[in-house]
Structure formats: structure tokens, C-alpha cells
Image (cartoon, rainbow, N blue to C red):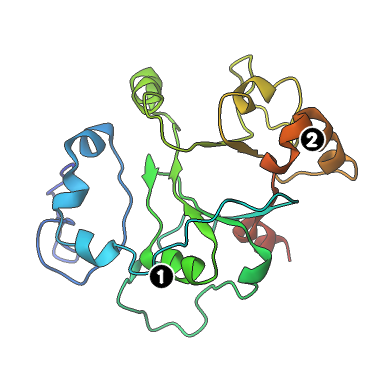
Amino acid sequence: MAEQSTISTGSDPPPFDPTEPSTPIAFPIKTLEDLESRAYFKSFHYPFNKSTVALQPLPLPDRRRMLVCHDMAGGYKDDKWVQGGTNPDAFGIWHWYLIDVFVYFSHDLVTLPPPCWTNTAHRHGVKVLGTFILEGGGKDVRDTLLLTKESAQMYDSVTIDGKLDWQNQLNERNKPFFDICDGIYVNYGWKEDTPKNSAAAAGERKYDVPGSFLHGTMKAKQ
């Protein structure tokens, strides 16, 4: 992993070194260099972050689908302690039977879901996705990530004009991206007719525009 600053004071904790044995935690990949070097897989923490519950290889249902995105204060809070934490009020999800896809999100280049989420989701037959995000990453990061042929679900943020402009639905300003990926996760500022309009724009692929819910954001509004 990329080295952090070694400047410290008497009260500062030592810099995080993922190669050194310590309490196992979940953490993201923050740089393209770390991603390309596969340093994560050489870390002390990697074996503890592997899911132990396999997802049964079933296709997504041919019906309306629900995608839940974990957007909780930047991620990696209580759930980063892969061997269990001490907070009995840590955030959790109870109604897994309503969910088809679960996404774990943070503002880092590569967000890897902590195994507690992956294992729990898999037990309920829910597919789990991490995230790639290009906030300030530049053209090199974008081009490298676009070389992959893995499954990709787009987030409704950038339009065909190259502008950051959430549409809150599938329309002509983001559909060209939808046409070349596996689905789109529309932003959560819905209006009454938004789901119907998105389904109409998707045509035969209407089930690839799942219902969505950013529970970290929604919780803050309660």
C-alpha cells in the first residue's frame, strides 16, 4: 500500500502498515498504484477479509429489483472490525428478503465490502458489489478502470456532456452509458413519475434499473 506520512507526535498512532500483524480490519484501496501492484492481496489483513459464505449462482429475478447502497458516513466504521466489534448499536440491515443487490460505498478509489456484509448478504441470496470511484482520479485512472470486462453497474452522476449532474432517472443524458453496462443505479432524488419514466427509457431492460435506497443518507434525514 502507499506509504503514509511518518511525521508523528507523542500522541499520534503509528502509520498504518497493512503488511504488519495487527487487529484485522477492512480497508479500501486508495491509489491506482496499490491497485495495479495487488498490494492488498499481500497484506496481513487480506485472509481475514475473504468471504466465507458462497453466493448461490442464480440469475437476478425477472421482476422489479431493489438495490441497497451502503452510504454510511464514508464507510469502514464499526463494520471494519472483521472479527467483531463492541458497539451493540452498530448499523445493520434487517429486511434482506426485500433486497436483490447490496452495494458498499465510500469515497475511495476501490471500496471493498467488509466480510460481515458479504457473508450476511450471501446467506440471504443477495449479490454484493463494491465500488470504483473517480473523484479527483484523473484520466489515467478512468482509462485503466475502463479496461476491465467485469460486471459493471453505473451510478447516475456524470452525463454525456461530461458534467456532474445527477438526473435522478434514466434519460437521454445518461442512457448511452446504461447501454454499454449491466445496469444503472439512479440517484435518490426521485419524483412521483421518476421510476415510470426510467422504466420507459430502459425499454426491455427495465429491470436493470433497480429501485434504490442510500440508507446512510436517508437515515440522516429522519
Q: Residue furthest top?
A: 161
Res. 116 mark:
1
Q: Residue at x 11, y 56 (%)?
A: 19
Depth check: give the residue in front, 221 or 78: 78
Q: Is residue 102 above or below residue 195?
A: below
Q: Amino acid at mark 2?
A: Ser
Crowd band around label 2 with a 10 angstrom C-alpha radius: few (<14), some (14–19), many (20+) = some
Quadrant housing residue 119: bottom left
Q: Is residue 188 above or below residue 11?
A: above
Label 2 residue SS? helix
Camera sees residue 134: yes
Q: Position of residue 176 (x, y in %)?
A: 64, 20
Q: Position of residue 156 (x, y in %)?
A: 64, 34
Q: Quadrant of the C terminus?
A: bottom right
Measured Cα–Cα span from mark 1 to mark 2:
33 Å
Quadrant housing residue 71: bottom right
Res. 198 mark:
2
Q: Quadrant of the N terminus?
A: top left
Label 1 residue SS? helix
- Sequence-first disc among 1 and 2: 1
Camera sees residue 164: no
Crowd band around label 1 with a 10 angstrom C-alpha radius: few (<14), some (14–19), many (20+) = some
